[in-house]
Image (tube, rainbow, N blue to C red):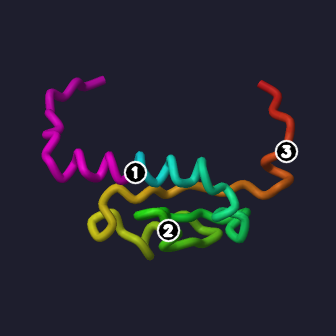
Amino acid sequence: MTKTDERFEVTPQVLEAMRQSERDNRWLEEHPEALEPYRGQWVVVYQQRIIAHSPDAREAARAAPARTYPGSTLFYVPTREEAEAVRIL
């Protein structure tokens, strides 16, 4: 295994993108109903809006590239059956 010593510079733009993502996550926690129409799909959230969605994650990501929407979040919205399923670890 090779260890690299690359540093990630935390610029004001990176900080703002992180803050945007946090704001969107809080919004989703407060408004879970916004995701109902997208069950079983991948969604991209940006500035408290669903800006792209698709059953295919790559397609959703291509529709809303991070360079255009810094701080956007891509995630899967489980179907009701998936959300209620029992997980065995």
Q: Residue furthest front?
A: 30
Q: Position of residue 42 (x, y in %)?
A: 59, 63
Q: Which mark is residue 21?
A: 1
The type of residue carrying mark 3 is: Glu
Disc 3 marks which residue?
A: 84
Whether residue 67 sits left or right of residue 86 in the image: it is left
Q: Quadrant of residue 2?
A: top left
Residues under labels 1 and 2: Cα distance?
A: 12 Å
The foreground one among 71 and 29 is 29
For image coordinates 72% across by 54% down, the residue present is: 78
Q: Which mark is residue 49?
A: 2
Q: Position of residue 77 (x, y in %)?
A: 66, 57
Identify the magenta region: 1-20
The type of residue carrying mark 2 is: Arg
For image coordinates 41% across by 71% down, the residue present is: 64
Residues under labels 2 and 3: Cα distance?
A: 25 Å
Q: Is residue 59 above or below residue 66?
A: below
| Mark earlier in primary sequence (2, 3) | 2
| Mark earlier in primary sequence (1, 2) | 1
Whether residue 25 sits left or right of residue 86 in the image: it is left
| Residue 6 is covered by the magenta coloring | yes
For image coordinates 59% across by 68% down, the residue present is: 56
Label 1 with label 3: CB-CB less than 8 Å = no
Q: Which mark is residue 61?
A: none
| Mark earlier in primary sequence (1, 3) | 1
